[in-house]
Amino acid sequence: MSIKRRESDLSAVRLGNVVLPAKGSVAGMSSSVSEYLVQNPHVAQWVESLRGYCETGKAWSARREFILRNMEAFPAVQPGQVSPHLDRLLSLSMAWANHVFLGCSYPQAVMEKIREMGEGIEVRDAPQHQTTKELSLRGKRSAPSEGDTDASVKRAKCASNEPDSRGSGRGAPCPVNQKSGPLPQAPAEHQPFFNRLYKAVAWKLVSAGGFGPNLDHCEILRSCVESCKQTLTCVFVPLKDITGLPAGRAQKEGHVCEIRCQTVYMGTGYGRDEAAAKNMASKEALKVFQGRKVTVKICRRRYKGREVEDLVLLDEQPRSQALPPALSYPFQEQEDPPS
């Protein structure tokens, strides 16, 4: 994804108390960020701590630039200091990265916000995504004639699943069709981290006098996750933008917050503002840690009106209610891992 910069973007960008010179071309932006981090190792160390556990080098490089380039719009954000403003910036950066690299979509207001914040950031060889509507229209335009039906269907099935081989000089074999969602081995890969997080939460709650309604649930969860060298991902959606709510709640003001860590769903909360919604979601997430253990599992959830498989953190207690609908879905069609 290559986006031309607006004239207003050509000015210098201030990072904290340091001014980062903006380059005159998009190609120079990444190098200027790298130069800035070399000159400011304390900022480099801090921003590196924000990297996701499973984030690729390309995705992290782009998201890191997104964070640094937009710090000027969040004056309360200072390297090494935790604040709700930092949480919001990180949430927007993750939403932008999910949109660019995974093809995720969000409510219109969120999409407009992250597109505006991401203007001027160049991602070389960004993956191309198509909506189901676009794929449907393309399928109708390329419908085969009766005489070529069998051969065309076979070619279409293979073409829809093989990677782009235009640069290799020869076609790739048609792999087995794989649905979108987490890989089967994903729970086992994430479980060790959440075992460590379980211990961190247990010790934190003991020092706080036990789990209760008067705790700062958001701060407890955040500090425990950061002690395990990770960060939370929060997605906020205005309540009025959520479809399918009961008629009595459809017009209520407020926000809904979904909390994830390492793409694993932890909790959802509602509040009159984003801070209240996040605290309630953190409280729901901490409830999972009250049992003897936590387990990462693949569960069925509703997302944008359809059933999907999602990674969910659960305790050992049976659930009497279905999981709340997902506000985000950080998975794409899985590809065969590189050999």
Image: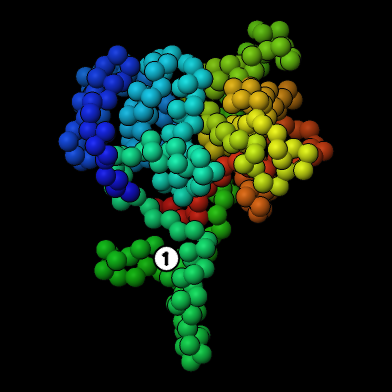
Q: Where is residue 179 drawn, in percent x and y?
A: 56, 58
Q: In the picture shown, does residue 286 fall above or below 246?
A: above
Give the camera-side residue of 212 and 95: 95
Q: Residue furthest right?
A: 320
Instruction: Write down the residue under mark 1.
Output: 162
Can you name the residue that lies furthest to the front here? 251
SS for tag 1?
A: loop
Give the quarter of the image for residue 209: top right
x%, y% of residue 116?
A: 38, 38
- At 42% from the left edge and 16% from the top edge, which residue is drawn? 76
Q: Is residue 234 left or right of residue 98?
A: right
Furthest residue toward left: 24
The quadrant in which residue 38 appears is top left
Taking the spot 61% from the left edge, 35% from the top edge, the residue there is 238
Residue at the bottom extreme of this rendering: 147
Q: Nearer the viewer, residue 219 or 115?
A: 115
Q: Residue 213 in the image: state x and y as whole percent.
A: 74, 15
Q: Amino acid at mark 1?
A: Glu
**Mark 1 closeness class: few <14, some 14–19, many ≥20 residues within 10 Å:** some
Is residue 287 placed above or below 320 in the rendered structure? above
Identify which residue, 108 or 176, lies in the foreground. 108
Relative depth, front residue between 103 and 159: 103
Asked whether residue 103 appears in the rendered view, the answer is yes
